[in-house]
């Protein structure tokens, strides 16, 4: 006997497709925003970087990597470039290393670590405590203004 070929999707396949479509529907707004604000401008910037154009009605002229060769010969650009590299190495790198070491330290089970965790966390929460406990909360200010007017 020949088996009949099924046409269409099985119920399991339909459920998988439906679940995937729900997931895609959730990420679609983010993908649209990424395309509009990140991907399209980045592509346009790359196109502009290999063109000669003065932003007027004149047509763009393809010059390839000549713009990059020209900018890397500029002394002011090179000084700015090395200042940026130095800043990144002197600030970003130590901050990342220190943050990683602090996170590892806070994750260890040591005697008295709760006090250390509180000491690290307290400066971030203390300003909100002062604001709430001082009686100058936004709701009290609104109620004071409405009663005095």
Image (spheres, helix red, strand yellow):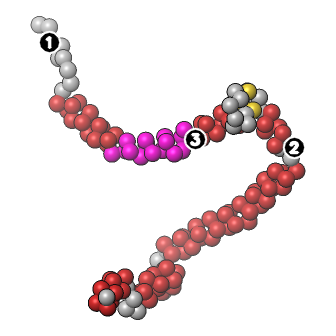
The crowding category of the residue bearing disc 2, from other C-alpha atoms within 10 Å (few below 14, some 14 to 19, many at least 20), is few
Q: Are marks 2 and 1 in contact (CB under 8 Å)?
A: no
Dot 3: element:
helix
Q: Position of residue 49 (x, y in %)?
A: 71, 37
Q: Position of residue 125 (x, y in %)?
A: 45, 81
Q: Which residues are magenta?
A: 26-40
Residue beneath disc 2: 73
Mark 3 or 1, which is nearer the eye?
3
Q: Position of residue 90 (x, y in %)?
A: 74, 65
In this view, 130 is above or below 72: below
Q: Is residue 32 magenta?
A: yes
Q: Residue at x 34, y 87 (%)?
A: 145
114 or 60: nearer the eye? Answer: 60
Q: Residue at x 75, y 58 (%)?
A: 84
Q: Which mark is residue 4?
A: 1
Secondary structure of the magenta portion, mostly? helix
**Of callouts 2 and 1, which one flags the residue occurring earlier in the amino acid sequence?**
1
Q: CA distance from mark 3 to mark 2?
A: 26 Å
Looking at the rendering, in which quadrant would you find the N terminus? top left
Dot 2: element:
loop
Q: Residue at x 14, y 8 (%)?
A: 2
Q: Is residue 70 visible?
A: yes
Mark 2 or 1, which is nearer the eye?
2
Q: CA distance from mark 2 to mark 1?
A: 73 Å
**Of callouts 3 and 1, which one flags the residue occurring earlier in the amino acid sequence?**
1
In this view, 101 is above or below 56: below
Looking at the rendering, in which quadrant would you find the C terminus? bottom left
| Relative to 20, 71 lies left or right | right
Dot 1: element:
loop
| Relative to 81, 4 lies left or right | left
8 or 74: nearer the eye? Answer: 74
Q: CA distance from mark 3 to mark 1?
A: 53 Å
């Amino acid at each position: 006997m020949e088996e009949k070929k099924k046409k269409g999707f099985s119920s399991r396949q339909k459920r998988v497709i439906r679940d995937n479509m729900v997931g895609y529907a959730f990420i679609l707004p983010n993908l649209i925003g990424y395309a509009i604000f990140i991907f399209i401008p980045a592509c346009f910037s790359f196109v502009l970087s290999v063109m000669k154009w003065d932003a007027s009605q004149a047509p763009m002229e393809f010059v390839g990597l000549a713009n990059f060769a020209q900018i890397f010969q500029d002394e002011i650009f090179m000084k700015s470039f090395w200042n940026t590299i130095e800043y990144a190495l002197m600030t970003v790198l130590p901050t990342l290393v220190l943050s990683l070491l602090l996170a590892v330290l806070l994750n260890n089970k040591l005697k008295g670590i709760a006090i250390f965790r509180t000491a690290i966390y307290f400066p971030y929460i203390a300003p909100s405590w002062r604001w709430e406990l001082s009686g100058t909360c936004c709701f009290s200010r609104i109620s004071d203004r409405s009663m005095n007017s």
